[in-house]
Structures are given as structure tokens and as C-alpha cells.
Image: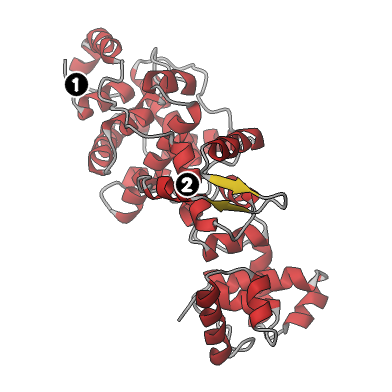
Amino acid sequence: MHVSLSTIVYLAIFFSPLTMFLQSFILILKMFILHFNLNTIKLEEFASMFHQILLQIFQKLNKERTISAAYHVLKGKRSGQTIQDIGLFQLHQYFGLLPKLPRTTFDEAVTLFMQYSWLKVQESGHFYMEKLGLQRAQQTPPFFFDGWHYRGNEHVFFARLSLIVQSLSYQTAAVRSFSPISRDPDIQNWVRSFLQNHHYLQGHLQQQLLDECTSVLKNIPVSDGSKQLVLYRLSGYRLPGWTWQQLADKRKESVLDSQLAFIETLHKLLNEVQQNNDYPLLKEVAQGVRVKILLTDSAQQTAQLYEQGYSVEQIVQIRKLKQSTIEDHFVELAMYEPNFSIGPFVSYEEAEKVWQASKHYQTKKLKILHEALKELSYFQLRLVLAKGEV
């Protein structure tokens, strides 16, 4: 039995106000359960997604950073070093994908890679990839995460959508009391306002949201299996969402891999919603989810003082912070503020020397570059690397 994507959406969300739908509810529910074996999911013939992502990150950081740098990227650590690494090594898509990633899980993967002769870790924590590891990294498929702009907020979007779907499902079934899928009071208050603003009791909201969900799922370039991950996490009247363990068992993969596939699908879905005007309701549900100001709060404060004409030294005194911390903020500005000029700190000719040395030694390590360009401070070197080659 083939069930189309639009039918699956109806079954997963099932809050259509149509009388015929309500009359055939039991039959459709039985069809849904019978088909609920994830038949359309086709497992790929490669290692786990988590391991592939790690290989890609390690390849970008190869010989340049400690093994922990990759862990901090995935956790979304907001330190100056990690934020700068994101820009220097083009790691934006991976940032903050797994904020709750246990260090033991990460270390187990590293140990496995070492056993496979994919990489070696030195006592200092620095690592380098071996030939076999580099070959394996090059064989990994491209991923389409957008961790830098969402930073875990995709889960806020889905929590809102899930509670909306659940609420409308129970309302359609004329059941007024239920246990909300989200316990977060912020999510509950947001959804309550959304439903009231859209006069959900009139029945029009159900159909419009259903149409938008059907359309966006048809339009995003992901497998049916990934789309089903999103749908099967939804809950409704007498139809609870599946747990991560249930989904992972059906997909014959780890829970972590199922969660990563789910996150990638949400990122694609959110980008589709943000870039088109065809999804007004979903765009409202996604309100505030995408990060617009990429600087850390502390760097923003430093930027405001600099715009007022204060020097680095004066900002250190005003903010009562270490000079190295303020310098971190300026490096962050150089990396993420297109209009910020490093001209007052380093000349064009000096910047050219830095890039020539970086290419010659094939590194972005400050220690090596400083030995080659002793006339430049570490701060100047960092600014040039952060700004990028012109």
C-alpha cells in the first residue's frame, strides 16, 4: 500500500475540519498504524552521520587545533576562541548542533577513529589526520546544516508547531483537556496567543496550516525518510509521537544520528520558510528563531564603545576587562561585521605579508606566523586572519 506524502501529513496532523474526515477517522487511523513501518526510508551504505560530521570538522581543523576544538564547535561554546575558529575554518554549519553532546560520546568516536588509523592525537591534545582519515573525510556526503544562524532554536520552532498541532487535533476531536506536549511556559504562552490571534475555533486555521505543512515538505530537498522523522515526532488526539529510540530502532541507526537528520531537515525547512512568502503561518511560528545579530553580547558592548571613538586601551578601562578579552571582541568584529575596518590596526601591506606567510607555511597557527613576522603582534595577526584575504 502506497501512502502519499500529503496523506501522511494528514495522518500525522489529522486536524482537518471536514466532516467526511472526522467520519472516517477510525479507518484512517488504522491505515496509518498499518503503514507505520517506515517503509520509505532507505538506509545509506555509509557510516553514521555523527561520525561523518566529525570527520569533516577534523579535516578542517587538521594540524591546527586540539581535538577539543571540534567538541566545542558542536556544543556551541560561546568562547572567543571557538567563535574565531568558526570563521577561520568555515565551521558555521556545525556550530551548536549538539549542545548536550556528552564528552564521553565524543571521546568514544575519537578512540574509534584512532583504531581505524584515521587520526592521531598527541599528548598536547593536538591532532593530525592520517591519509586514510583524509580519504574517508573526502568521501563523506555534503550536509546542509545551518547551526550558526539557528543555534538550537530550531527546537523552539518545532516545540511551537508540535503544540499547535496537538491543540488543534484535540479541538477538532472536541476534547478540551489534554496534557500539553511542551511543558515550557514560554512555548505554551506563545502558542496560546497564536491560536487566539488566528481564531482557531472557526476552523480556517487548521486547513491553512495543513496546506502550508504539505507544501513546505514537498518543496524541501530531503528524503521521505527525513520528512517522516519530522511528522512522526508530532502528536495528536489518540496518536502520540514516537520517541527517539523508537525512530532510531526503525531506521537501524543511533538516536544521535536520527536527531541529526531531524535537525538538518528542520534547518532546510526553516530556510525554505524564511526565503519564501508562501508560508505566512509557518513564518510566524518561526519568528525570532533565526539569529540576526551574530556577535556575542559582550562583543556588541565593545563595538558600541569603539563606534563612540574609544580606543582599545580606553575600552579596557571602561569595561574593566582584560585587554586580551577586548582584543577577542575586535577579532570577532573583524570576522562578522563586514563594515569593520582593520585599517587602524594593521596596514594593507602588513596584511598581505600575513597571507603570504600563511600560504607559504600552509597554516593559520599564530605561533608559526609570529616567528615569520616578528614585527607584527599576535593581535594584528588575528585581525588579519579574521578579516580574511581581500
Q: Which is nearer the eye, 154 or 65?
A: 65
Q: Residue at x 34, y 44 (%)?
A: 269
Evaluate whether residue 134 shows in this view. yes
Marks 1 and 2 in Cβ contact (< 8 Å) = no
Q: Residue at x 31, y 15 (%)?
A: 37
Q: Secondary structure at mark 2?
A: helix
Whole-percent x, y for residue 239 in the image: 38, 15
Quadrant containing the C terminus in the rendered view: bottom left
Whole-percent x, y for residue 295 in the image: 59, 64
Q: Secondary structure at mark 1?
A: loop
Quadrant containing the N terminus in the rendered view: top left
Would residue 24 appear left or right of 59 to someone viewing this image? left
Mark 1 or mark 2: name the one nearer the start of the chain: 1
Would residue 41 appear left or right of 299 to someone viewing this image? left
Name the amino acid type tagged 1. Answer: Val
Select label 1 or label 2 by which is in front.
2
Q: Which is nearer the eye, 244 or 156?
A: 244
What residue is disc 1 on?
A: 3
Quadrant of the image occupied by residue 102: top right
- The label on residue 133 is 2
CA gap, disc 1 and disc 2: 41 Å
Q: Which is nearer the eye, 347 or 156?
A: 347
Whole-percent x, y for residue 90 in the image: 48, 61
Q: Residue at x 72, y 84 (%)?
A: 310
Q: Is residue 87 above or below residue 254?
A: below
Q: Which is nearer the eye, 317 or 28?
A: 317
Q: Residue at x 38, y 45 (%)?
A: 140
